[in-house]
Amino acid sequence: MNYTIRHYWTKEDIVAIYYNPLMELLYEAATVHRMHHDPNTVQVSTLLSIKTGGCPEDCGYCPQAARYHTDIEGNDLMSVQHVKAQALRAKASGSSRVCMGAAWRNVKDGPEFAQVLEMVRTINKLDMEVCCTLGMVTENQAQRLAEAGLYAYNHNLDTSEEYYKEVISTRGYEDRLETIENVRKTNVTVCSGGIIGMGESKEDRAGMLVALSTLDPQPESVPINALVAVEGTPMEDEKPVEIWEMIRMVATARIVMPKTQVRLSAGRTEMSREGQAMCFFAGANSIFAGDKLLTTPNPDVNQDMEMFRQLGLNPQKPFVKAPQPETIEALDSKYGTMGEKPRWSRPGHKIERNELAKERSKLAPKE
Ligand code: SAM
Ligand code: DTB
Ligand code: SF4
């Protein structure tokens, strides 16, 4: 096995790795992991939903899409003070990173974006890594986030290019790749991963890992989510992901992207400690902590800290993998609003299960 970083993984290579006998796969992934990371350190990150629900997109997995009837509580953009208070709480409980999520299709220039930039400045000044996931961004918007002190931008490919068409009809895979390219033109690190358990094949999982691992440079961070099947979404009846699938996916991601932070993301409430321990052994080196992800439940932080004690894991300090970005104040910004009108795609093909969920939502009683 050649352990240097390669960027030419094929789907066949990756499927072959994924299907290795489990003990071989674990041994190889753990070996690669130890070459680039401390196996006893796992980063604790906290998610903050800064703008919840009412999203115009039709992502088949997402409880925040306005067109499906789910029982989440929507919210307008949070205040900077509220965000600061939550970040301080997260820091006190051991988090070194805050990831702010907004239920937006793409970032729009204006007062709300200015408010998000202020949130980024505020958290960076608390000496925590700041990540945002706000939908598609232009290069100018990515530069302004970078100036504010953003450490990472999360923008998931979610699945293979082929299966993406079965999940979302309101944007295309190329829009996601373009946003990742825009972020890459700045100093902000790239966080991009996906979801398993949406009805995709093993080839689709491999296809997603091809798309991610052939990016040059590879993403600094790759979240692997198990679908949280939320009632009212088109995927409400998907069967839970088996822990073995999660372990294989993490291990394969680790082997094809040796230096990346692989994040054991959504779906941990359904995983035993033993299962999570195997994911850490296979190369996962981050979790999201706090009793809520964006809108769905997550294990309690005290239980996670108890798991860390049992496994002898230490929370990762901030800025171990890349230096802390500088924060430039709004008044000193080099980049003004460009008034761009980016034309993100809107394929608009029909996805049957998305259409059915939308119809069901029209029949649901109004609150
Ligand atoms: N609106 C922005 C976007 O889509 O890029 C950012 C927020 S979005 C909720 C962030 C990511 O959460 C999605 O890309 C998806 O991978 C993940 N996600 C959303 N709903 C999920 C679910 N039910 N189960 C697992 N992951 C989910
Ligand atoms: C990611 O890949 N997973 C996190 C983070 N990036 C933003 C989000 C998971 C969301 C799970 C569904 C919810 O709580 O709404
Ligand atoms: Fe909107 Fe993001 Fe949810 Fe898609 S995943 S519906 S873009 S919040």
Image (cartoon, rainbow, N blue to C red):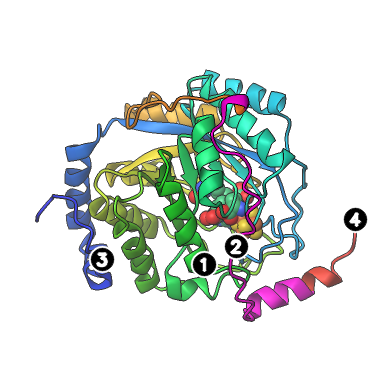
- Of callouts 3 and 1, the N-terminal one: 3
Residue on which the image places disc 4: 367
Residue on which the image places disc 3: 14
Amino acid type of the residue tagged 1 in the rendering: Met
* Residue 269 visible: no
For the residues labelled 3 and 2, say whether their Cβ atoms are less than 8 Å apart. Answer: no
- Of callouts 3 and 4, the N-terminal one: 3
- Of callouts 1 and 4, the N-terminal one: 1
Residue on which the image places disc 2: 61
Amino acid type of the residue tagged 3 in the rendering: Ile
- Of callouts 2 and 1, the N-terminal one: 2
Percent x, y of residue 146 = 49, 36
Residue on which the image places disc 1: 198
Q: Is residue 23 left or right of residue 279?
A: left
- Of callouts 3 and 2, the N-terminal one: 3
* Residue 303 visible: yes
Q: Residues within 10 Å of mark 4 (few under 14, many from 20)?
A: few
